[in-house]
Image (tube, helix red, strand yellow):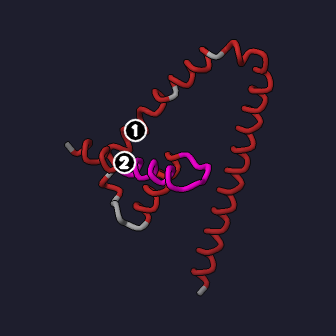
Amino acid sequence: MNYIKQFGIIIFLSFIGEILYKLLPLPIPPSIYGIIILFLCLELKIISISAIKESSRFFIEIMPIMFIPAAVGLIDSWQIIKTAWIPYTVITIVSTVVVMVVSGKIVQFIIKLSKKEKGITRNK
């Protein structure tokens, strides 16, 4: 029963995201609206983490299964993709490397920043 309640909370916030998508003239997917609403609810303590923890963990565990339809769609679209598979591959590799480098630099910056803040508070 706990899973149903937690799943209901997540679905409700996703539904609100769908409504916002219809109301706001922005090119933002409804799922992003839902994630932002969920984040704000968690950050503002409107919803506690324990209220969705088990269902969230379940969704993360089954996430790889969710990529199967996309992979099947790619295989199904091979006739269209085969003429441009090299550019797709290059773009995928380059963008993956760029995301990894930028993410790493940001994490290093945040770690250095937090170490400086801790050093400053210790000297006071």
Q: Within the image, what quadrant is residue 37 found in?
A: bottom left
Q: Secondary structure at mark 1?
A: helix
Circle 2 sits on which residue? 10
Q: Is residue 54 left or right of residue 114?
A: left
Work out whether residue 18 or residue 90 is closer to the camera in this orientation and state it. 18
Q: At 55% from the left edge and 18% from the top edge, which residue is drawn?
A: 72
Would residue 103 be counted in the magenta stretch? no
Q: Disc 1 vs disc 2: Cβ atoms closer than 8 Å?
A: yes
Circle 1 sits on which residue? 59
Where does residue 28 sit, x and y in percent of width and height?
A: 58, 49
Precedes in sequence: disc 1 or disc 2: 2
Q: At 40% from the left edge and 60% from the top edge, which residue is drawn?
A: 42
Where does residue 69 sit, x and y in percent of width and height?
A: 51, 23
Look at the image and give the residue range highlighted in magenta. Answer: 12-29
Give the amino acid at mark 2: Ile
Q: How many marks?
A: 2
Few, some or many residues within 10 Å of mark 1 (<14, 14–19, 20+): some
